[in-house]
Amino acid sequence: MPTSDNPNFMRVWRTILGFVEMYLTGGQPVSEVPDKPAVPSGHPDVAQTLSNLAGHYRDQAEKGDPNAQYKLAMALWHQGANFFDKEVLEWFEKAADQGHAEAQYELGSNIMEGDLPRSKSWLLAASEQGHAKACMELCHLELEFGVGEPEGIKWYRRARELGHPHDASTLGIYPPIEKPTSDSSVSGVKNRAKRGVTEDQYLLGCWYAKGDPPFHRNFIRAYAWFVVAAGFRPGETQRTWSYSQDWGTPMRAVCLLEQVLFDDERRLAHRLANYYAEKFGQQEGL
């Protein structure tokens, strides 16, 4: 580590160390960390700091400390190594084998497309320790790769319970138009939805489910609009839903949200859906 009689220099150096340490230990969501370092590792101070940290963690890692093994893997990875480099993968696996949830999550989420059974095994291990991002990745794995829809919904609910900043995209609820484009387009969609136009009711539900600006994510409103778009009438939302395999339809969206809403949310959603169905349920042409 550099030495200097200048107190300002040492203060800056300690700040750099602090930020890099925070970065490596979860200061940034791991799911957002790219294969190559987001920090400017080419800068001599940061590159040297990463190298110093790797050296510091290596001693403890070789003694079997799982937290040091995980931090060493992260330091090596963000020095520019590929995730699948032998040494990086080896240290992640050593930490994961000892129950380190972050290491298990990294392995599960990064090897997903190459080895689904192994990916699922690591994600399950992390999820069982209460790792919210691992729960959401499990949901994605179950739904996206057709392993099992009920299981996917179960893990989505668990991620919500753990406070994951969820939206409906993981469930496969996508609007035909990805985002609201302007205030006028939003106003037009709302007006047509209230006049009973099914396509706009579904689109409005998607926007509420995703939470794209200017909308705030609201599963209760989304559910109500999906019910109306699916053509239900007052009283029909109290049934037990079966799964719909028709992707991109109001019925499927209703089935999915019915499963992931918490009990108090579901009661409110049913009441609002009945109100919307009574007020906006009669379809009209443009």
Image (cartoon, grey):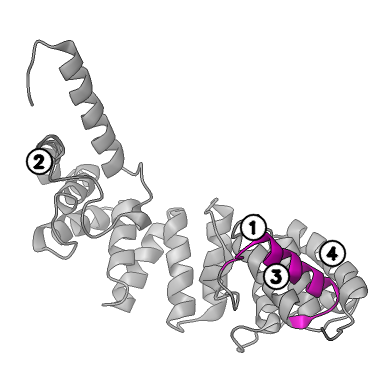
> Of marks 3 and 2, which one's residue comes earlier in the chain?
2
The numbered disc on residue 205 is: 3
Q: Nearer the viewer, residue 154 or 173?
A: 173
Check disc 1 and give the amino acid type. Answer: Arg
**Which residue is under mark 1?**
217
Please tell me how crowded label 2 is: few (under 14), some (14-19), or many (20+) other residues with Cα within 10 Å: some
> Of marks 3 and 1, which one's residue comes earlier in the chain?
3
Q: Residue furthest front?
A: 184
Residue 144: x %, y % from top left:
45, 79
The numbered disc on residue 203 is: none
Check disc 4 and give the amino acid type. Answer: Leu
Q: Which residue shows up at 22% across the image and 30% down it?
A: 16
Q: Is residue 180 magenta?
A: yes
Q: Which residue shows up at 27% across the image and 70% down it?
A: 111
Check disc 2 and give the amino acid type. Answer: Ser
Q: CA distance from mark 4 to mark 1?
A: 16 Å
Q: CA distance from mark 3 to mark 1?
A: 10 Å
Q: Which residues are magenta?
A: 179-198
Q: Is residue 195 magenta?
A: yes
Of tags 4 and 1, which is closer to the observer?
1
**Which residue is under mark 2?**
51
Which element carries disc 4, helix, strand or loop? helix
